[in-house]
Image (cartoon, rainbow, N blue to C red):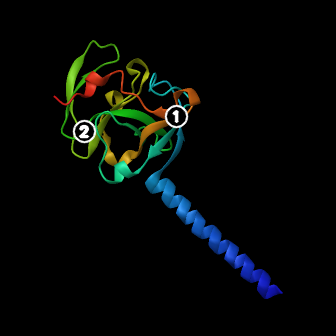
Amino acid sequence: MLRGVLGKTFRLVGYTIQYGCIAHCAFEYVGGVVMCSGPSMEPTIQNSDIVFAENLSRHFYGIQRGDIVIAKSPSDPKSNICKRVIGLEGDKILTTSPSDFFKSHSYVPMGHVWLEGDNLQNSTDSRYYGPIPYGLIRGRIFFKIWPLSDFGFLRASPNGHRFSDD
């Protein structure tokens, strides 16, 4: 009897570990559901919108200008940020101060990306902390799940002129 109970217990523990490993790999390498907070990506993503982020692009260097990404915050490693990729390594970026009074150019160094929120007036992004290392990117957002009225693929940036290929 004890042998049967121990056998069932070890089998249950084994299945739990196996399914835990499968779930970990799925969320780490395939993607997952994310709730975005804050006004920096309005109007594309509103506060408390729920989106799907896929992680394969970051592993295969498939991030492109215009993509919306989840990244570790350079100023607070415990939190994530949701921003749009404006520049890739080697790009020349026209940077402006929040008041739009001072304009200058910045270059994105190798292994980095330039991120900005769609709501330029209310976004803390690469204009403040500079280009971020590619390794801080956690995934690429491409699909909105909630609210149901906005269900579907994300629309283009209202600031599309900021990342043209010319």
Give the residue at x 49% y 24%. Answer: 39
Give the residue at x 19% y 26%. Answer: 105
Give the residue at x 54% y 31%. Answer: 49
Considering every residue shown, the one lying at the far right of the view is: 1
Residue 146: where, in percent of width, then height?
57, 33
Q: Nearer the viewer, residue 35 or 152?
A: 152
**Residue 121 marker:** none
Q: Amino acid at mark 2?
A: Leu
Say if residue 92 shows up in the picture.
yes
Residue 155: where, in percent of width, then height?
40, 28
10 Å crowding of disc 2: few (<14), some (14-19), many (20+): many
Q: Say whether disc 1 or disc 2 marks the residue closer to the N-terminus.
A: 1
Please indicate whether residue 99 sits to the left or right of residue 80 in the image.
Answer: left
Q: Secondary structure at mark 1?
A: loop
Residue 44: where, in percent of width, then height?
44, 26
Say if residue 48 shows up in the picture.
no
Q: Nearer the viewer, residue 104 or 64?
A: 64
Residue annotated with mark 2: 88
Q: Secondary structure at mark 2?
A: loop
Question: Can you say whether 9 is above or below 45 in the image?
Answer: below
Q: Nearer the viewer, residue 130 or 156?
A: 156
Please indicate whether residue 18 sits to the left or right of residue 4 in the image.
Answer: left
**Residue 36 marker:** 1
